[in-house]
Image (cartoon, rainbow, N blue to C red):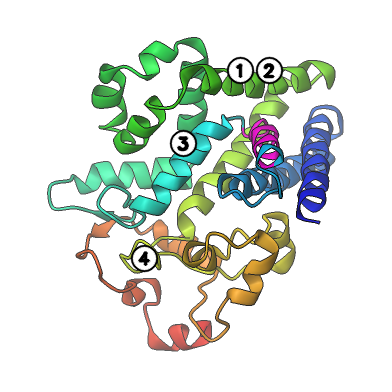
Amino acid sequence: MKTVLNSCLLVLSLSLSAGSLWAASHLDLPYAVLAIWFFALINNMPFALMHEAVHGIAADAPRLNALIGTIAGWAFPTSFTMQRAAHIGHHQRNRTDQELYDYYLSDQSPARRNFWLYAGNLVGLYWWCVLDSNLLYALSPGIYRSRFFIERIATPLGFGPYIEDLASLPPRRVWLEVVLAFGYQAALFYCLDLSVVAYFLCNMAFALHWSVLQYADHAWSPRDVKNGAWNLRVLPPFRWLALNYHYHLAHHQQPQLPWYELPAHVDKNALQPSFWRVYFSLWKGVRPAPPMGAPADLAFLFPNSAAARREH
């Protein structure tokens, strides 16, 4: 059942993403704008399926699981092998000093941290950084895996530990997956006769959505590797399109659960901040980092107790 369900969702989401790109390129402006908005939503489904494959739960057989993850990565576009290493690293580093975007440490510049919070998570640069690094890998794996790139470029940008992990992966496999992903995008562009402007706007909309979602489900949560996340409250259709990705605390607590089992493991009596509450709070900027083990920063996220009670 799991293999069939996720395979069907992969085909459906890739088809709808491609259809949105075509509509944005060829339809009148009102429909094109609607297509851009829908692309920003539906393109999260292949990413969510790749996320399932990263944890080995997209299919019953390991080879089918890897196949789903690899093809799902084409929509991003990225390498499944790279994404798996990066995401497992995320589970290991979550809310530690190596992965903390809502706070700044004592030896860090608040202005620089704010730049990466605003530009990276809120203005979509996070997705563009991943895209550009994948392109660099396709063009020159040697430079990507060099000490210069890791220490002089990736580390100042805050990606040092992740690039260290990615640089140790089998280069031929990663290179092939990256090339296939970009090849899929090129095929879409050619076969659907896409407009450069429409293609850019669709991906920019997706970048905005995806980049903020990657941290809205963690911001101001406890500084705890396992429990440092939120089960965000969003309208059900948007949560379904993302395959319950907003139930991120449940996922971090039990990463072996497939997406369709997560709702049953969400504590309905626990705090579930809305996506938009966390999103707008991020625009207030970074704060001094509390020590590891500190509880959620509810005083900042909920400025008054009445609001906090409403969110329960």
The overriding secondary structure of the stretch rendered in magenta is: helix
Nearer the observer: mark 2 or 4; the answer is: 2
Q: How many marks?
A: 4
Residue type pointed to by label 2? Gly
Distance of label 2 from label 4 (alpha carbons): 39 Å
Left or right relative to 300: residue 26? right
Q: Is residue 282 magenta?
A: no
Image location of residue 220, percent across then percent down: 36, 65
Q: CA distance from mark 3 to mark 2?
A: 22 Å
Image position, residue 235 (x, y; %): 68, 68
Q: Which residue is mark 2?
A: 183
Disc 4, SS: loop
Residues at marks 3 and 4, CA–CA distance in whole angstroms: 21 Å
Disc 1 crowd rating (10 Å Cα; few below 14, some 14-19, many 20+) is many
Q: Residue drawn 45% across and 11% down? A: 140
Quadrant of the rendered structure where residue 153 is? top left
Distance in Å between CA atoms under marks 4 and 1: 37 Å
Q: Residue at x 61, y 30 (%)?
A: 77
Residue 46 sits above or below residue 290 on the image: above
Amino acid type at image mark 3: Leu
Query: Residue under circle 4?
Result: 220
Q: Residue at x 34, y 69 (%)?
A: 222
Which segment did they paint magenta? 65-76
Residue that label 1 marks: 179
